[in-house]
Image: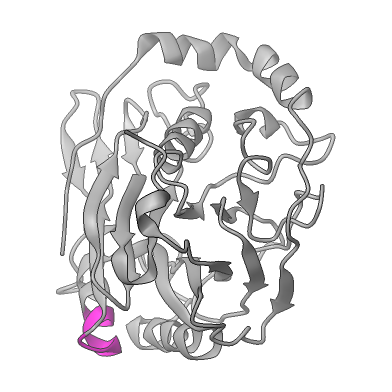
Amino acid sequence: MQRHMETGRRSRRRSLRRRFGRTAATLSLLTAVACTSGQTPDSVTGAGAGTGTADEVSVATWNMCGVRQWSCEKTGGPKEKLGQLRDLIGDSGVQVLLLQEVCSEDLTSFARGLGPQWQSAFEPYAEVDATGRRTSVDCTGQGKGQAGYGLLAGSPLTDVEAIPTEQPTVGLHRGVLCARVPAQRVRVCNAHLSLRESDDEHPDWDFRDDQLSSLFAAASTDAGTVFGGDFNSPPPVGDKNTSAWIWPSEAYTTYRECDQKGSSRAGRSTLKDGSKIDYLFTQLPRTACEVVDTKASDHRPLVMRVSRPENPATISTAG
């Protein structure tokens, strides 16, 4: 299934807050409630964590680096990336994947290659110029389709929706895509956030705080949501971290991150350069977390295993 929803709404008030509200946002983050107690998942790097129990579901996020013209020429082709997907399914028991930087036709091919029960949902990236005209980003190579982000699941996806988020006025639009996975009794949301200085017209504006706010708000409507993706941001730790202010206070408190241990928010690196910019959050009990080594991308897949909600009729927090 493919779905395209334009989500280019603008807000001058929020844009002004980006420019002038950073000091207040930083102070707010520093005074936010410290992490509450919660389960600390077992963590494994490289080796698979296994399939888990019948009451658990494993969700992965992975920037596949499948858009070859975006410095991905040396990260393997569709064959290597499909092989990595099979390893995640076989070794780590992954049933749902949040994917970024994937070509639409590759995603369709991956679902077909994994078996008839696998389904996908896709949302394309778009380049927006100074006149507001949107142009799709086509993947290099014949028959590759558009570049974008998507969902892949070993069972039907329902209620697929693109969540409106603040985006650059001129530049590349990414976004947030959510769906339900009824067979797993969870809802998932896949986010790919903007880079800093990604607005060609206003390079001093930062959209990641608004995008994270929209993502956490979308997750708050259903306590059975697992959400994450490529946030293009380090975790809110360290004295030299100039982007800690973008994180909402409910991150690491109301919601726990896959690799979070007690009060530590650092997590292991998910990018080959040694940084962490890929995340998975949930309110569900976490039972395992792993960072998987791969040669098929510059990002390492992040896998989180959680306990499924017992009764899906009781997990919604929205009227």
Residue at the location (39% across, 28% down)? 200
Splitting the image into 4 quarters, where does residue 2 fall? bottom left
Could you tell me residue 166's position as x and y percent? 37, 28
The N terminus appears in which quarter of the rendering?
bottom left
3 or 53, nearer to the observer: 53
Could you tell me residue 228's position as x and y percent? 50, 53
Residue at the location (42% across, 50% down)? 315
State yes or no: residue 112 in magenta: yes
Residue at the location (43% across, 20% down)? 202
290 or 233, nearer to the observer: 290
Residue at the location (24% across, 34% down)? 7
Could you tell me residue 119's position as x and y percent? 23, 73
200 or 191, nearer to the observer: 191
Could you tell me residue 212's position as x and y percent? 50, 36
The C terminus appears in which quarter of the rendering?
top left
State yes or no: residue 50 in magenta: no
Residue bounds of the magenta highlight: 109-116
Residue 316 appears in the picture as rendered:
yes
In this rendering, the answer to whether 106 lies above or below 223 is below
